Amino acid sequence: MADLRVTLCGVPLKNPVIPASGTFGFGREFDELYDISCLGGVATKGLTLKPRPGNSVPRIAESRGVILNAVGLQNPGVEAFIAHDLAWLRAKTRVIANVAGSTLEDYGEICLRLDGLVDFVELNISCPNVKSGGMALGIRPEHIREVTALAKASLKKTPLIVKLSPNVESIAVNAKAAEEGGADCISLVNTFTGMVIDIERRMPLLANRTGGVSGAGIKPIAVRMVYEASHAVSIPVIGMGGITCAEDAVEFLMAGATAVQVGTQNFTDPLACPRIIGGLNEWCDRHGVAQISSLTGACK
Ligand SMILES: Cc1cc2nc3c(=O)[nH]c(=O)nc-3n(C[C@H](O)[C@H](O)[C@H](O)COP(=O)(O)O)c2cc1C
């Protein structure tokens, strides 16, 4: 049996496999299917200061090898999460609280509320589906530096992960901006902005017109971005985008990731994460890899 443990910003994880934000709720439904304490951690649905109903339907569309979503950060709000889900989830595994704001100040306030209560805060400055905040703060390096520094100032105890948008000119420049702003770790990629047209109705399929593209089809682009970002910074990187199996996860680790997140595949196969953890064990054994952490950045 290989040693699957990894350390992220000084925090030990059982293994590098984490369900991605927005594809796993707060873990309760999945825990009915398997004991989620087997996971390296859970990234929560994006939390905002106040509850949000999300966008109008239809807000999910399928296309070949990918899906598009325009959920629009539907969530019960940070206080409801703290009151109803946090203690339960934290007793199971590491908690990565994914957070989003409409204004710069929102980000500071929500970080202050979560500091010391969760294992990591993951700053979502890359949501393409909301009108204010969201991706607007995650495109230009100077904005990334500013929002990161503001969040970091509110976090005295909890490490800060900044989740980067792939809808940018240079992922290396933006990764560096997050590091300069004080991020302890970066994660990427969030979804790519896309559109599907219903040709019978001659209208966009999604009520929001555009949505975020995720799933197996985006993997080679995501791997390239993780490779470029990890070579631009010296903080750890969490890689994601289209992971469906253990071999995909290995690819992200070799590209430079310390841990990986699995998103859309949780919808297709709710047992994807435990299957990938088992597959990583087998892959390491077959390849004589004693410690999975030795694969990080192993791509020559
Ligand atoms: C339905 C849905 C909702 C999502 N919600 C969030 C969110 O709230 N916050 C966030 O940072 N990312 C969100 N994401 C993006 C995922 O966490 C992930 O970055 C992206 O889907 C790429 O990974 P994948 O190809 O494995 O799905 C969402 C993705 C999907 C499909």
Image (cartoon, rainbow, N blue to C red):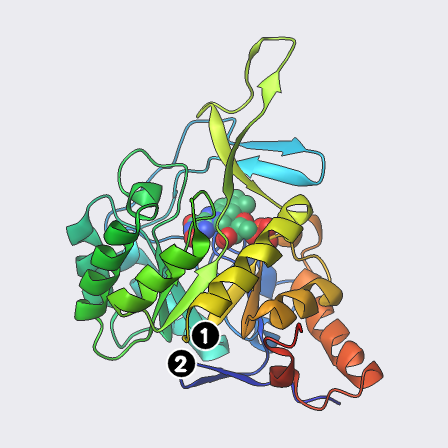
Q: Is residue 62 left or right of residue 124?
A: right
Residue at x 75%, y 90% (from the top left corner): 1
> Which circle marks residue 236 in the picture?
1
Q: Secondary structure at mark 2?
A: loop
Q: Is mark 2 within 8 Å of ligand 1?
A: no
Residue at x 51%, y 72% (from the top left corner): 41
Q: Is residue 163 visible?
A: no
* Total numbered labels: 2
Q: Amino acid at mark 2?
A: Cys
Q: Is residue 36 left or right of residue 178?
A: right
Q: Is residue 7 left or right of residue 245?
A: left
Residue at x 57%, y 67% (from the top left corner): 260
Judge whether 128 appears above or below 106 on screen.
above
Q: Amino acid at mark 1?
A: Pro
Residue 192 percent across, percent down from the top left: 51, 41
Judge whether 59 appears above or below 216 on screen.
above
> Which circle marks residue 119 in the picture?
none
Q: Which residue is mark 2?
A: 9
Quick one: quadrant of the C terminus? bottom right
Question: Which quadrant of the view contains residue 292?
Answer: bottom right
Residue at x 56%, y 59% (from the top left corner): 240
The tag earlier along the polypeptide, 1 or 2, is: 2
Label pair 1/2, CB-CB below 8 angstroms: yes
At label 2, counting other C-alpha atoms closer than 10 Å, the crowd grade (few under 14, some 14-19, many 20 or more) is some
Residue 46 percent across, percent down from the top left: 38, 52
Judge whether 215 appears above or below 109 on screen.
above
